[in-house]
Amino acid sequence: MTRPFLSVENLVVHFPTPDGIVRSTDGLSYTLERGKTLGIVGESGSGKSVSSSALLGLHRGTSARVSGEIWLDGVDLLKLSDEEMRKRRGKDVAMIFQDPLSSLHPYYRVGDQIGEAYRAHHNVSKRAARIRTIEMLARVGIPQPDRRVDDYPHQFSGGMRQRVMIAMALINDPTLLIADEPTTALDVTVQAQILDLLQDLQNEFHTALILITHDLGVIAEVADDVLVMYAGRAVEYGSTRELLTRPSMPYTWGLIQSIPDVSGAVDKPLRPIPGSPPSLVNPPKGCAFFPRCPYAKLVDGTGDRCAHELPELLSITPGHLKRCHLEDPEVMYQDDTELETAR
Ligand SMILES: Nc1ncnc2c1ncn2[C@@H]1O[C@H](COP(=O)(O)OP(=O)(O)O)[C@@H](O)[C@H]1O
Ligand code: SF4
Ligand SMILES: [Mg+2]
């Protein structure tokens, strides 16, 4: 059996700290094909960035303990030497971040920075790299690219700077692009433009795209599949359509209710999920969402099972998996009064 283009298998990223081991990613698995988009969604601190950074080998040389397998185009990235990984980083796999200034140096002209990113992987002259850079700036929608190529990062607006970073990430034509909250800092209109641009470029370059966000609304717009993360683990995973129309565990349902539009329940008030995520050093023994879950009692009458037994990630229908003891997700779709009675 051939593996999918990207196959992350049982990925673990733990950080030893004086307070104990921080279990930022604890057995994460997912797959992605070229030309497709996987959305990874979850509240801040759920392990989205830490798990994705492992795909670029960014934990190498740190205290992080990484295990599992990351197969990209038939190669397990975790088994590569540091030197081999360095050759692939920025070429086969590229990443863009919420804050472009974390990738762009403030004191160098953007054209020089993008050109250097290109020359790091291609044996070409500065002149050739500059021509390629201008083409790329034009492609990401920067007006007058032959002039703006000599500007510094601070001379661009937030949205334009994000475009510059996308140009830098895509200049080596990576097969996998990871976009970590790329639009979080932007206003809604610019956010939509950047998402459109990412989708256009993905179609053109046939890139596999991992889009990380805490906003399920963004996922609804662009992702083929969704992975919902909670406390370092996948709690639900499936096609975007299936997951948004038939969410099967309470955390996903909570995320859906905390955004407008996609729930389809326009007459309902938006409800943020009360409480906060658990400690990753001493995670709850059973289901990590138990302390915040209003449905635990519906499982066994007492909530004991949820409190003590970690649910496995199991498929409910082909390709749709959930980590939850609740058998019938329909109970979540009831309105609040019914829920109050059931609790
Ligand atoms: N170097 C580190 N040492 C210890 N803990 C870390 C380190 N990096 C990240 N973490 C912790 O890992 C958890 C997941 O972080 P992260 O992946 O950045 O979350 P997200 O991107 O979902 O907001 C957080 O609790 C964070 O504090
Ligand atoms: S396993 Fe129990 S506590 Fe966890 S989400 Fe499902 S119902 Fe809630
Ligand atoms: Mg993050």
Image (cartoon, rainbow, N blue to C red):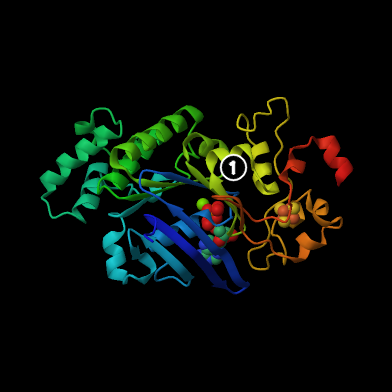
Q: Could you tell me residue 92's position as x and y percent?
A: 30, 55
Name the residue rendered at 47%, 27% in the picture.
189
Note whether ligand 2 is within 8 Å of mark 1.
no
Q: Which three-letter amino acid code belongs to the residue tagged 1?
A: Leu
Q: Quadrant of the N terminus?
A: bottom left
**Crowding at mark 1 (Cα within 10 Å: few <14, some 14-19, many 20+):** many
Considering only vertical position in the picture, is 175 above or below 83? above
To which residue does mark 1 refer? Answer: 243
Q: Could you tell me residue 340's position as x and y percent?
A: 86, 41
* Relative side of 188 to 108, left or right: right
Could you tell me if residue 58 is visible in this image? no
Q: Looking at the picture, tell me which residue is in the foreground, 281 or 145.
A: 281
Name the residue rendered at 29%, 50% in the picture.
174
Corner quadrant of residue 110? top left
Name the residue rendered at 72%, 56% in the picture.
325
Q: Looking at the picture, tell me which residue is in the foreground, 323 or 85.
A: 323
Considering only vertical position in the picture, is 166 above or below 27? above
* Relative side of 151 to 307, left or right: left
Secondary element at image label 1: helix
Q: Could you tell me residue 330's position as x and y percent?
A: 74, 41
Considering only vertical position in the picture, is 327 above or below 68? above
